[in-house]
Image (tube, helix red, strand yellow):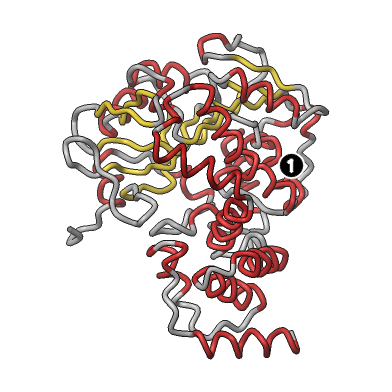
Amino acid sequence: MGTLDQGLRAMIAERGNLHCTYVGAPLMQVVSQVEQPADAFSLHLYAAAAFATLGEVARAMDHAEAALDTNPNHVHSQIAFRIRNDALWRLDPARFQFRAESISTKAWTDEEYYSFYQLINYKDQLSLYRRFPAYIEPLFVYVYAALLALGQHGEFTELGGSLFDAWDKLRNCENLFGMGLDLKQVPMTNIERSSFLAEMARLVHLDVEIRTYNDWRDVPALDSPRVSFSRGVGSYAFANCAEFAEWLLQSRVTVLREEFACGEDDEVGASSGMRYINFSLSRFLDTVNGAGLHVRPILTQPASNWDGSPRKNASGSTIMATYLVTEQLQADERAFLCRTLDSLDLSSCCDAMNGMQMKPLPISSAIFSKQSSYQDLAEDAWPVGSP
């Protein structure tokens, strides 16, 4: 690392007591652990955090990107992505004013305004997977392995695909692992309620054939087995747990991240002009298990706000962020999926999407050996003796 190493070390020694409020308390807890960074990624990350704290946005972004060029899947990469993305907003006055006004006036309740606002956010996210072609979202390793397990016969569907960066995430998995998934042979479906975002998804994937539907009920049944993904969309796509289970039954494998209520009752709320439901986790599990699906939990923990505080619903109880797989695979398909996960080289893979989480996201075939109850998941989220 030579001169760069020495220069960064000198800056860190000079400014080592800085508190990086710029990127939020939870992230600083991670940054503060890098007291004597030894590798290039950590050196650049610490420099990015320091410059961000000082308000030197351009230099912060340069160092964040330098860190990501070193290893976009580093265990702390999400901090660098956060600094980079915030810098993009701050370096573009028009965009920064747009975000500030939307927050102050609650203008996102207007559907058109909301679509433009989300377009900017999703465009930035899409750019990450194209700027760093080996950067992966860990949850998509399960999607990738499931498609491989189904051979060249499976199709992929995303619920709430927005700009459909799911395709880019799968391509990056293939870039990193090279297991032979031919995306040209995988039919792609995007279920997106915003016609504006759905059209933009097609425009940024001109060489990909994407079938688009406004509602999950409109998706026709196909002869090929389906693998699906959803990140937080079930809370507003479905009216109740029965509908949620009905959609899950359409796929052989579904990977999802959802926020559930920890009590016996569903919790209804509204955000960004949209009504949503935090379904009762115990009721959801009862419904899905009753439908004959296998539920394979990956991770459960209290959901958090951007400032690190626990997210609570209207009744004051904590919301549970739950990552899981539901599946109805044949025994040989499940065994192939597990062997695929075991064979992947995860030495360069990390909890990239969990830099702001309290627990690492496991990527392991071991999840397919357990079918957890609500009690199991609750104990995982709140170990005995925790508040």
Pick the front one: 214 or 186? 214
| Number of residues whose C-alpha sits closer than 10 Å to that of mark 1, classed few (under 14), some (14–19) or many (20 or more) | many
Q: Quadrant of residue 348?
A: bottom right
Q: Is residue 46 visible?
A: yes
> Where 204 sits versus 242, above or below?
below
Residue 82 picture location, percent across and down: 54, 57
Give the left or right position of residue 217, taking residue 44 as reference. Answer: left
Give the left or right position of residue 77, taking residue 224 as reference. Answer: left
User: Which image quarter holds the N terminus?
Assistant: bottom right
Q: Residue at x 63, y 74 (%)?
A: 44
Residue 326 picture location, percent across and down: 46, 32
Instruction: Give the number of marks.
Output: 1
Pick the front one: 163 or 254? 163
> Where 110 sits versus 118, above or below?
above
Q: Secondary structure at mark 1?
A: helix
User: Which image quarter holds the C terminus?
Assistant: bottom left
The residue tagged 1 is 171
Pick the front one: 285 or 9? 9
Pick the front one: 77 or 88? 88
Residue 208 picture location, percent across and down: 78, 27
Q: Residue at x 53, y 68 (%)?
A: 55
Q: Is residue 330 visible?
A: no
> Where 146 sits versus 35, above or below?
above
| Type of amino acid at the residue the image marks with label 1 | Arg
> Where 332 sits versus 361, above or below?
above
Residue 94 picture location, percent across and down: 60, 44
Give the left or right position of residue 348, taking residue 314 as reference. Answer: right
